[in-house]
Image (cartoon, grey):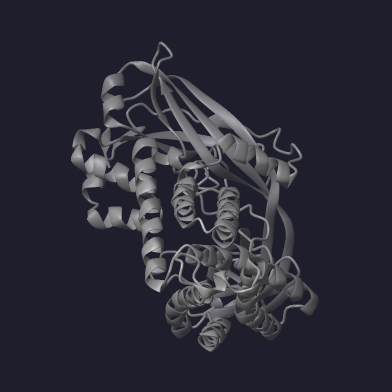
Amino acid sequence: MVALVTAIQMAFEWVGYFQDTPSAAVLLRPLILAWYMGIAALAAAVVLQDPVPGADQDWLIRPLKRKDMVLAKLAFVALAVCVPMFALNLAHAMALGFPFALSLGLILFKELYVFACFILPVMALASATRNMTEVIIVAALLVVVYALSVTVGAYFMGADWCPTCDSGISWLQHVLQHAEILFGAAVILFLQYYRRRTEVARALAVFGALALVFVQLPWNAAFATQGWLTGSSGAATAITLERGPQVPGSEVTDNAARDKDHGARHAATLLLQGHPDQALEYWRRRGAPAEAPAAVELPMRAAGVSSDELLLVDRLEVELFADNDRLLYRRANADVPLMLLAAQPGIATDESGFTNLSVDVPGSVYRKLGSRTARLQMDFSLTLMQAVAQYKMAARNGLLRAPDIGICSSEYDQDSIAVRCSKMGRSLFCYSATLFAPDGRHNPEIVRCIPDYRPYLPPLTNIVNFFGIDLPVRDPYGLAHYAVDSSELASSYILVKIYGERDHFKRTLAVSPFRLSAPQDR
């Protein structure tokens, strides 16, 4: 089993080295599954060599300390799994050209992270079973308990079941969950090897599956914690939100037709993507077509954002009040595009820099309000990003090495330039690239920004983070024309910008009086 797991790790690292090729992308999926299954099976088998439940195990009457037993098993798995993984990860990093000292520290942290967050919980689960069949059954039970808990939470609380989900500070919830799992694993190992309380250990595992769902960080506490960790400097004091002029009869559209276009596949996709609240909302609309929401279009913009800054929307809470201040509707964690509130590349605005913000209002609320006036309040949780570094690289066959961006290369491929980067340590989540000609002409800036404010928390499988961006230079349909085309790539260069967090802050925008007009079909 040790040889098999090591072989899987070798294959995984080898394929990962060529991860840009199509064949490698196909092989990575089964190898990732084999990686998890192989390590979990080996960890469980080591524990089950001397099962704790039952009264027919001779190790209980041998002159052997229980502490020595559990430490021997932990040490064996660490030597059999983590040591080969450490060597292979280090060889991978050296082959990619990363510095030895940097790679050594990060890989050591990654192996400790894998041991604490994956291997130790598997061994704890195995210690509460008699054989591999029971391991599979108990693991399946925990998965079912977790899935049902998520479904119940999403049904009764909607998006509030997980306030930080799909946001840049979801890593805080993940750290909390990892801490819960690690603590639970330590307690189960203690209960089994020092008290032999199998029923209590299994009950604790079920309780832990429930806690992973229902013990959630409140948004305000998590957002304040992120601001404290970032060291927000108050740079966003001058930023204000402004609402544009309302055009009567054009701000409400009917989403019923849009919902009819979606089938069961849409709900299944939402579930697979980890959005049970949206899947349940979809089925509610299908069951009650009259509840299909009306989309309220509001022109908005942010003032005070400079040209080298980006404004990200982490969360939007919408509240609609009647004229007597009675709450009619509230929706938290509403889906809004990033960088929507400031004029940025790729975001459509009018001449005044306003963009349309779409807010869904349930059909029942829409009919209840009718033509009466109301007050709309929007609470924004925002992050101000600023360009912290920029680098130049050749447009064709370019190579860039920098500590805060890693190793990047550029390659022309038919209609675009593919910029591909690999980096150890904290992965970049906000960056841009622009193609420049020698005389200063340039194509539109391409921005990639997916909020992820976590410090360095390594993925369990990979030691290297991969990211990239494509810069179009020719439209095969002839609809778009670029200032710098493929004929000038030999003398052109790419300007890469890296954005870092500058401030996390909140803003509130109230629209009063607010009036809904008749919806127009899309």
The image quadrant of residue 468 is: bottom right
The image quadrant of residue 268 is: bottom left
Quadrant the C terminus occupies: top left
Q: Residue furthest top?
A: 324
Q: How many marks?
A: 0
Is residue 392 visible in the rendered image? The answer is no
Which x, y percent locates residue 450? 55, 55
Residue at image point 44% right, 85% down: 23
Which x, y percent locates residue 247? 39, 29
Camera-side residue: 503 or 80?
80
Residue at image point 42% right, 80% down: 26
Which x, y percent locates residue 312? 58, 45
Residue at image point 67% right, 65% down: 496
Is residue 410 visible in the rendered image? The answer is yes
Camera-side residue: 23 or 54?
54
Camera-side residue: 164 or 502?
164
Horizontal side of residue 117 vs 106, given as left or right: left
Which x, y percent locates residue 300? 51, 35
Task: Judge whether 455 appears above or below 251 on screen.
Answer: below
Q: Residue furthest right?
A: 101
Task: Judge whether 179 appears above or below 480 on screen.
Answer: above
Task: Judge whether 31 appears above or below 238 on screen.
Answer: below
Camera-side residue: 76 or 32?
76
Horizontal side of residue 388 vs 240, given as left or right: right
